[in-house]
Amino acid sequence: MKFNNFDGGLTEGQMIEHMKDLASKNKVFKSFIGMGYYNTHVPPVILRNILENPAWYTQYTPYQAEISQGRLESLLNFQTLITDLTGLPMSNASLLDEGTAAAEAMSMCNNIQKGKKKTFIIASNCHPQTIDICKTRADGFELKVVVKDLKDIDYKSGDVCGVLVQYPGTEGEVLDYGEFIKKAHANEVKVVMASDLLALTVLKPPGEFGADIVVGSAQRFGVPMGYGGPHAAFLATSQEYKRMMPGRIIGVSVDSSGKSALRMAMQTREQHIRRDKATSNICTAQALLANMAAMYAVYHGPEGLKAIAQRVHGLAGVFALGLKKLGTVEVQDHAFFDTVKIKTSNAKAIADAAVKSEINLRVVDGNTITVAFDETTTLEDVDKLFKVFAGGKPRLN
């Protein structure tokens, strides 16, 4: 039964039927867009025992530490996961998403410089949504956001508090930021690096480059895309800046009996401390999704995570090599992890052909397409992509 007129209202049963009818019209295509959003396999044990378990999903935040040791242990696992992969010693117990985490890091840079330097530079290789969020948040701090190509970034003004870069870049490139960070530090500028957790299982950690703050999303660690969210973000930094970190930090303490116990060691939101001492008023945690990401890491283990990363990179490599043999487009020749950048004169036509095969690609501009691979990608998917780029012809052997 279809309902086109709601003047008289609907019963609950009729409304459910109507919503099912609307939902049946949705078409979920295979996404190769990337930009911080990837398909992932949720291990069934995590799906059943955490995501679908009211004992976990109704618990927004474990205020009562004495009855929340299990949840606190899981969040401590999340922090440990982040510090291990980023190469920095301090991590909070999750933030809202990657874009707002980057904005929080921008605020940290402003606070570290005590508000004396009011320009924040963002490299153009950052995700566009991250750039937009930082611009929006900057107004509240009276900060000036400048977006520049990496090679054009300089600090001549003497007014730069921090710089944000992406690793790997939004179009897939993997760069060595060692000299870039040395130059920034020589000019007393803090470096924020937005990164990808799966990539960090095989790439050099940002902390080893000398990055001051690392942010990103834990989404591809067992958290469904969910039509864009919610997803748990992370923020890691050095001990020096722990008092300026947003969010909350889980620590190990000792109880009255002398036994090891977990607690929230630091809470910096205004609902927890005096408003003038708060580091942020929007540093909302995503405890459930952070717990899922932590358990995903426990489920697979270090070698399992690395194997997933190597397989994703391998599929991207097969695709790039196949396109070069195909010869109809130009594959950009730079180091990459999971995202292949392609130059072509008919980007829109290729993207439209992909849609007909229920595939979503990212059209960067009229001449540029990127194809991002993930944990769920199969060789059959790669075959379909080849057919799209070959104009419907069979794959190359």
Image (tube, rainbow, N blue to C red):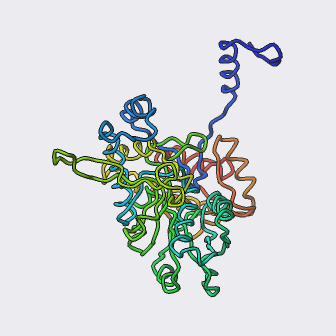
Q: In the picture shown, does residue 295 fall above or below 152? A: above
- Visible residue check, residue 378: no
- Visible residue check, residue 63: yes
In the rendered image, residue 328, in percent from the top left (x then y), is placed at: 67, 61
Question: Residue visible at 70% across and 28% down?
Answer: 25
Q: Observer-nearest residue: 8 or 31? A: 8
Q: Quadrant of the N terminus?
A: top right
Question: Residue visible at 66% across and 25% down?
Answer: 24
Q: In the picture shown, does residue 156 fall above or below 81? A: below
Q: Observer-nearest residue: 28 or 359? A: 28
Q: What is the quadrant of residue 299 in the picture?
A: top left
Q: Observer-nearest residue: 136 or 38? A: 136
Q: Observer-nearest residue: 22 or 266? A: 266
Question: Residue visible at 60% across and 78% down?
Answer: 117
In the rendered image, residue 291, in percent from the top left (x then y), is placed at: 40, 43
In the rendered image, residue 5, in percent from the top left (x then y), is placed at: 83, 17
Question: Residue visible at 48% across and 79% down?
Answer: 181
> Along the horizontal axis of the image, is 204 left or right of 372?
left
In the rendered image, residue 81, in percent from the top left (x then y), is placed at: 35, 54
